[in-house]
């Protein structure tokens, strides 16, 4: 009863920020992302009646109690659906920095959902898999699919209509995403805690909710019309709004560092000099820059010269989940 699955991270163009139900991971708003080819997680799951507890290995190390608890809760959910009672060994390798704003929770729980359901003997379609992955980490529901993906928030209290699906238009739009590493350490405020605190205490959260669905409509229209300026403008504004909500929280917090601002300013300068590039930032200090493929080398060279940028990873739209033969351990 073993299976190995691979899932790629995704970068949110329109952010998921806030839950209306924390147990079921139901979001306050719909969101939109690009799955990335460059970053991924490979997870092996083996269920065995020989085990007396779940074991979670992350990057070759036994994970902490707190980290393991999240995996146990997720596996309990899978065991419940499958009607089986066995413990598992989960062996996961992140080819992405963990908990640094590069969406390791998205690739991590998408890979775990795919591997665990297969290992336990379920034959799961992608819609169901997206709903299961959602209950490990919200953003993971989008990493089931490749390309441009929308997570519709849904209306039902049981979450039955809250899952991701590829947007129908322009999946072949091969934009470039340059992921700039300015800090690889784990964030102090995990996404889960950050969005919860913001929903509960930030007076700016209402402003987020009042405008985010309109941003999503505009981003989808921009993709359908291949209007890069329209897309970049709404993507950048949406990211700034999300981060603004954290400043109003109690206690307040921010994911940016001075290096974050340096990259943001540089991207705006690139635009002044005639290169179309826009930034977005998830819950962390690292900046992702989107541009046309024809400009990617020029943008990369500019960003790589900044003293505060440790590395620039060139990414493109990547694939959805896949399964690996049982004998493989990573890649
Ligand atoms: P990120 O920006 O990396 O998504 P989050 O704060 O959203 O950061 O989530 C980090 C958490 O995601 C980790 O503390 C861990 O619980 C979970 N996570 C990261 N990688 C994996 C993985 N490979 N398998 C399962 N869970 C993972
Ligand atoms: C800012 O999906 O990591 O990256 O559902 O609590 O696990 P949990 O949070 P997570 O939040 C992602 C927040 C974001 C925006 C996004 O990816 O849409
Ligand atoms: Co995350």
Image: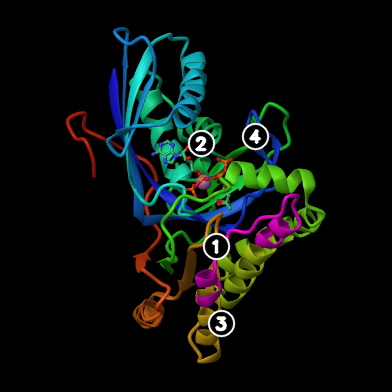
Q: Which of pointers 4 and 3 indicates the residue nearer the eye?
A: 3
Q: Whole-Å distance between the Cαs marked 2 and 4?
A: 11 Å
Mark 3 Cα shell of 10 Å, populated few (<14), some (14-19), many (≥20): some
Q: Whole-Å distance between the Cαs marked 1 and 3?
A: 14 Å
Q: Which residue is mark 1?
A: 281
Residue 180 vs 184, above or below: the answer is below
Q: What number is the disc on residue 130?
A: 2
Q: Which residue is mark 3?
A: 268
- How many numbered marks appear? 4
Q: Whole-Å distance between the Cαs marked 3 and 2?
A: 36 Å
The C terminus is located in which quarter? top left
5 on left or right of 224: left
Give the extent of the magenta segment.
242-262
Q: Which of pointers 1 and 4 indicates the residue nearer the eye?
A: 1
**Residue 330 in the image, given as x and y percentages of width and height:** 23, 40
User: Which one is nearer the viewer's eye here, 313 or 162?
Assistant: 313
Q: Earlier in the sequence, mark 2 or mark 4?
A: 2
Considering the numbered disc 1 on the image, is that residue within a helix, a strand or a loop? loop
The reply to whether residue 221 is visible in this rendering is: no
User: Which one is nearer the viewer's eye here, 28 or 87?
Assistant: 87
**Residue 167 in the image, given as x and y percentages of width and height:** 54, 53
Q: Residue at horizontal 42%, vertical 62%? A: 172
Q: What number is the disc on residue 207?
A: none
Q: Residue at horizontal 42%, vertical 31%? A: 64
Considering the numbered disc 2 on the image, is that residue within a helix, a strand or a loop? helix
85 on left or right of 220: left
Q: Earlier in the sequence, mark 4 or mark 3?
A: 4
């Amino acid at each position: 009863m073993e299976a190995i699955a691979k899932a790629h991270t995704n970068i949110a163009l329109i952010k998921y920020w806030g839950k209306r139900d924390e147990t079921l991971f139901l979001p306050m708003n719909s969101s939109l992302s690009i799955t990335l080819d460059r970053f991924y997680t490979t997870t092996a799951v083996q269920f065995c009646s020989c085990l007396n507890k779940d074991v979670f290995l992350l990057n070759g190390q036994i994970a902490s109690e707190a980290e393991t608890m999240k995996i146990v809760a997720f596996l309990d959910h899978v065991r419940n659906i499958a009607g089986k009672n066995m413990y598992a060994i989960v062996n996961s390798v992140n080819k992405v920095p963990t908990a640094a704003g590069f969406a390791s929770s998205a690739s991590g729980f998408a890979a775990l959902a795919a591997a665990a359901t297969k290992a336990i003997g379920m034959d799961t379609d992608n819609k169901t898999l997206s709903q299961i992955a959602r209950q490990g980490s919200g953003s993971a529901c989008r990493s089931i699919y490749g390309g441009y993906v929308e997570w519709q928030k849904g209306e039902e209290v049981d979450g039955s209509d809250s899952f991701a699906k590829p947007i129908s238009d322009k999946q072949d739009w091969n934009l470039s995403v340059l992921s700039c590493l300015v800090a690889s350490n784990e964030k102090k405020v995990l996404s889960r805690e950050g969005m919860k605190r913001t929903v509960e205490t930030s007076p700016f959260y209402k402003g987020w909710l009042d405008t985010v669905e309109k941003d999503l409509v505009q981003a989808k229209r921009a993709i359908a019309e291949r209007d890069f300026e329209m897309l970049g403008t709404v993507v950048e504004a949406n990211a700034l709004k999300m981060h603004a909500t954290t400043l109003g929280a109690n206690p307040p917090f921010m994911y940016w560092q001075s290096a974050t601002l340096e990259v943001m300013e540089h991207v705006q300068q690139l635009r002044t000099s005639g290169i179309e590039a826009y930034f977005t930032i998830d819950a962390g200090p690292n900046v992702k820059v989107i541009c046309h493929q024809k400009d990617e080398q020029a943008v990369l060279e500019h960003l790589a010269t900044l003293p505060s940028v440790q590395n620039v990873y060139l990414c493109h739209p990547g694939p959805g989940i896949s399964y690996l033969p049982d004998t493989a351990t990573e890649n």
